[in-house]
């Protein structure tokens, strides 16, 4: 893994606690800014698919009480 350029969501504003994403080739890396040593690795395609599914409400049933 080369030196990663971590980016946080513009939605986070100036908050320190946020999700950060970096990429290297086809790999996507996700971490929580307040625990930067724990990194989830996936492919850019899978992350893209998951984000679109979340925006479309595909996982809303998991949060219903």
Image (spheres, rainbow, N blue to C red):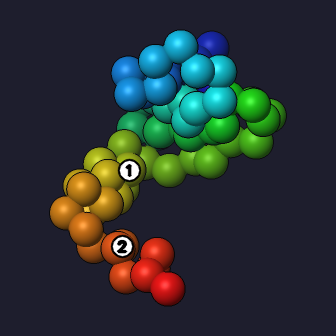
- Whole-percent x and y of residue 37? 80, 34
Residue at the image position 35 percent from the left and 73 percent from the top = 60
The residue indicated by pointer 1 is 47
The residue indicated by pointer 2 is 59
Residue at the image position 78 percent from the left and 35 percent from the top = 35
Residue at the image position 39 percent from the left and 38 percent from the top = 26
Mark 1 Cα within 10 Å, few/some/many (few <14, many 20+)?
A: some
Q: CA distance from mark 1 to mark 2?
A: 14 Å
Element type where label 1 sits in the image: helix
* 20 lies above or below 56: above
* 40 lies above or below 36: below
State which quadrant residue 56 falls in: bottom left
- In this view, the residue farthest toward the bottom is 65
Q: Are marks 1 and 2 in contact (CB under 8 Å)?
A: no
Q: Which-is-in-front pick, marks 1 and 2?
A: 2
Element type where label 2 sits in the image: loop
Residue 45 in view here: no
Residue 57 in view here: yes
């Amino acid at each position: 893994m080369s030196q990663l350029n971590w980016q946080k969501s513009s939605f986070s504003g100036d908050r320190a606690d946020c999700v950060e994403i970096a990429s290297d080739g086809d790999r996507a890396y996700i971490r929580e800014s307040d625990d930067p040593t724990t990194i989830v690795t996936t492919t850019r395609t899978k992350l893209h698919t998951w984000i679109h599914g979340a925006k479309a409400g595909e996982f809303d049933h998991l949060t219903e009480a």
